[in-house]
């Protein structure tokens, strides 16, 4: 996440010095063959912050400049506004939690000012549940905020999709929560970019705690152009595993790390020191990331580099998947799902566009 209101943003590539790689100085490999296309264009170069692919291969996209969450269907080209968040100015990370058949999503929202950055005490985590077909009614009108939208995946434009909203928790001490991932059905992990730490939120008790805060999550106030340390965040967990790998980028350090975290028990705990996966100029100012299905590689979005990089987890090798205008301002990347999304990667951007990238190989 790189907020568009920061005046120094355009100078960042000139002011940050490249770092050495964990595996020597990285050199980009030739980009694999890809097919790219622009799927959606929002008006006025709207800053699209995060993208999440649903089980139906539709795309949830968050907007920074207005507190909006949108649902897009790359198959039909249709777009629907899912919901807005009253009293908030930005929507940040999106993650799915619980059983995927239940379509439960968590969304980070709060306030950000040009003068002071993220506003402490304004950040909330909202649950957004999709209700389809027979489950669309009845509503619990005493406890639910429910609205209906046009289902963008229905070519006939007759099917409605109900949206149920509920407050999952608040983050009273956070200044700029950013990346977002579910560790298990009741625990959400959050990167606090300005605070330089990894947080957890238990949606049952509404309590949150610090999981990790060390030299892999922070930024240096003396030298940083942007007050952003830990940024993109994803969880990779083998089936029935009691622990998970948590992958995260650090925008200030031009790096990707991973740490083993317990996924069972009342609170997540770090089980070993974080490991450096890759670092260097080719990862300059990384934003969000995605983990491949087999957990062997990562896709990293670089908005200032206009690129998607592939990082091989075991070797630290980095190669450019696609770059240039085809993924201009790439902020977030998410893998396609199901038959419709097989081989596709979807990318949100800071220029109001959603891109589709067809990979000739494993995603």
Image (tube, rainbow, N blue to C red):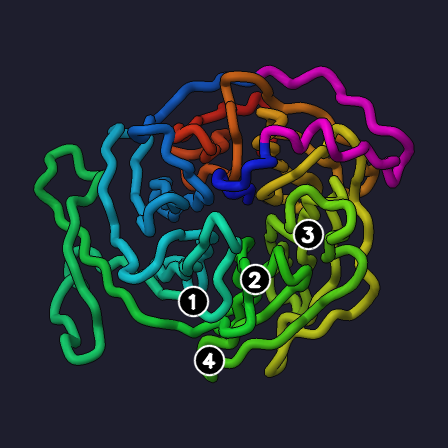
The answer to whether residue 61 is left or right of residue 331 is left
Q: Which residue is mark 1?
A: 122
Camera-side residue: 286 or 90?
Answer: 90
Q: Earlier in the sequence, mark 2 or mark 3?
A: 2
Magenta highlight on residue 32:
yes
Query: x, y (%) of residue 226?
Result: 64, 45
Judge depth for marks 3 and 4 and give the one in front: 3
Closer to the camera in the image, 133 or 199 = 199
C-alpha distance separating marks 2 and 1: 15 Å
Q: Is residue 159 above or below residue 194?
A: above
Circles 2 and 3, Cβ within 8 Å, touching? The answer is: no
Q: Which residues are magenta?
A: 10-33
Q: Eyeballing the image, is 221 above or below 46?
A: below
Q: Residue at x 63, y 26 (%)?
A: 305
Q: Is residue 46 above or below residue 104?
A: above
Name the quarter where the C terminus is drawn.
top right
Given contact means CB atoms under 8 Å apart, are the residues at marks 4 and 2 in contact? Answer: no
x and y percentages locating residue 186 in the rendered image: 49, 73
Provide the residue designation for mark 3. Answer: 229
**Do tag 2 and tag 1 residues touch (Cβ < 8 Å)?**
no
Residue farthest along the left direction in this orientation: 158
Asked if the magenta segment contains residue 173, the reply would be: no
Is residue 104 in view? yes
Earlier sequence position, callout 3 versus callout 1: 1
């Amino acid at each position: 996440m790189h907020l568009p209101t920061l005046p120094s943003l355009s100078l960042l590539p000139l002011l940050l010095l490249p770092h050495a790689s964990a595996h020597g100085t990285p050199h980009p490999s030739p980009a694999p063959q890809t097919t790219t296309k622009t799927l959606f264009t929002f008006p006025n170069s709207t800053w699209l912050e995060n993208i999440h692919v649903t089980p139906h291969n539709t795309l949830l996209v968050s907007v920074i400049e207005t507190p909006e969450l949108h649902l897009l269907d790359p198959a039909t080209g249709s777009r629907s506004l899912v919901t807005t968040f009253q009293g908030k100015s930005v929507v940040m990370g999106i993650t799915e939690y619980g059983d995927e058949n239940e379509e439960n999503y968590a969304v980070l929202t709060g306030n950000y000012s040009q003068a002071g950055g993220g506003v402490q005490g304004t950040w909330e985590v909202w649950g957004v549940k999709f209700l389809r077909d027979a489950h669309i009614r009845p509503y619990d009108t005493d406890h639910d905020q429910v609205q209906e939208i046009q289902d963008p995946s229905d070519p006939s434009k007759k099917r409605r999709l109900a949206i149920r909203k509920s407050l999952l928790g608040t983050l009273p001490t956070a200044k700029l929560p950013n990346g977002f991932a579910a560790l298990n059905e009741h625990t959400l992990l959050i990167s606090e970019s300005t605070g330089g730490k990894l947080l957890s939120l238990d949606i049952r008790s509404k309590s949150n705690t610090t999981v990790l805060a060390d030299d892999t999550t922070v930024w240096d106030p003396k030298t940083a152009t942007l007050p952003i340390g830990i940024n993109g965040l994803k969880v990779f967990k083998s089936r029935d595993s009691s622990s998970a790998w948590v992958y995260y980028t650090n925008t200030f350090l031009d790096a990707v790390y991973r740490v083993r975290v317990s996924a069972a028990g009342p609170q997540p705990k770090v089980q070993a020191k974080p490991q450096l996966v890759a670092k260097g100029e080719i990862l300059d100012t990384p934003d969000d990331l995605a983990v491949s299905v087999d957990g062997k590689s990562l896709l990293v979005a670089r908005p200032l580099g206009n690129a998607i990089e592939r990082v091989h987890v075991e070797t630290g090798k980095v190669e450019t998947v696609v770059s240039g205008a085809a993924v201009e301002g790439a902020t977030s990347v998410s893998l396609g799902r199901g038959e419709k999304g097989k081989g596709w990667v979807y990318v949100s951007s800071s220029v109001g566009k959603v891109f589709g990238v067809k990979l000739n190989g494993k995603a």
